[in-house]
Image (cartoon, grey):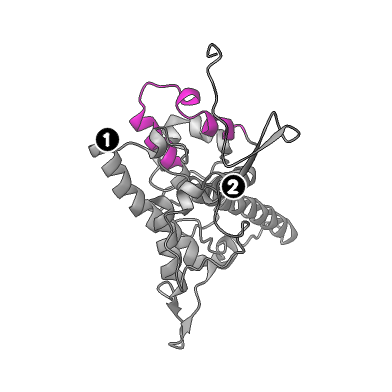
Amino acid sequence: HECSFIVFLLSLCKIGCFNWTGAGGGTNPTSPEVIGHASLSLLHAYLNVTRGLQRDYMLEPAGSHGVWGLDDYHCVPFYLGACQMRAREQWQQKRQLNQKKKKLEAKESSGIGTDTDDDARRLPDNPYLPESTTVTDPSDPPILDATHADNNDHWDPSIIRNRPILESYRGTYLYLSCIHFIQQIKPGVPFFESSPMLNDISHLGNWSKVMAGLLRLFEGEVLNKLPVVQHFVFGSIFKANWTPSRKGPLEAPKRTFIGGPGGVEVTGGMPVTRAPWAK
């Protein structure tokens, strides 16, 4: 179901539903920034619906044990959430560089800084961050949006074990929301038992490694699995334009050998196997 929803969004994108109108009135192709904002907002809304169904109707996960999901049901939200956390990490790196630059400028100008220059304090918009954020001095209180708050601290993947952070920022960051939902539906169960793979991921050093690993996981364990992709509907928008690895349909073997390839050749089917005690 998750893959079908992603393909649906891809189809909408390809037919121009996410295009935006420029200042001159012309329509521009979908930009990565638009895709970034849309992916986060739509996945948040999608998860609100699916989680309600899973919780209220106690739906069984795929394969009874969530064979294609990190939390029994989903995989893609974890990857997009890791992308969002990586974007936050990059923003913090730029923030630190801006602060160092301001300090150098202040020293060169004999203490007359540029703290009142809003253009110097504001960082470029990041498509995976919920709101544009203004860089402040470390001594200043953080500027928080009423809807999307952030304490501006450094978060590595182990932050998922910090319950106050999960409670405070699950509405802002998709990855934290996914972890919080697991703890909701599996209360009292140690995280390393309920989600051993996610627990192992939390020991990685940075969000770039988490992103790369989750993408490989999705490609290998979801998109490369016939039980999943056999439900896709291909057409003029979502095309199946790859080269098949097998020519023609599968056929049952017409010859076989007793005792391996070097054994006795039998044509017309397998010989009857007699019971060991039969004479």
What type is the residue that disc 1 sits on?
Met
The span picked out in magenta is 176-203
Q: Where is residue 195 drawn, in percent x and y?
A: 48, 30
Amino acid carrying mark 2 in the image? Met
The answer to the question of whether label 2 and label 1 lie on touching residues, with beta carbons closer than 8 A, is no
At which x and y percent is residue 201?
A: 58, 35
Task: Determine whether 72 is above or below 88 in the image.
Answer: above
Image quadrant assignment for residue 104: bottom right
Q: Which mark is residue 58?
A: 1
Of the two numbered discs 2 and 1 in the rendering, the one whose residue sits closer to the viewer: 1
Q: Is residue 94 left or right of residue 130?
A: right
Name the magenta segment's main secondary structure.
helix
Residue located 59% across and 54% down the image: 91
Is 246 rendered above or below residue 236? above
Say the numbered circle drawn on residue 211: 2
Considering only order in the chain, which callout, 1 or 2, is on the residue closer to the N terminus? Answer: 1
Disc 1 is placed on an element classified as: loop
Dot label at residue 121: none
Question: From mark 2 to mark 1, how far is it between C-alphas?
Answer: 30 Å
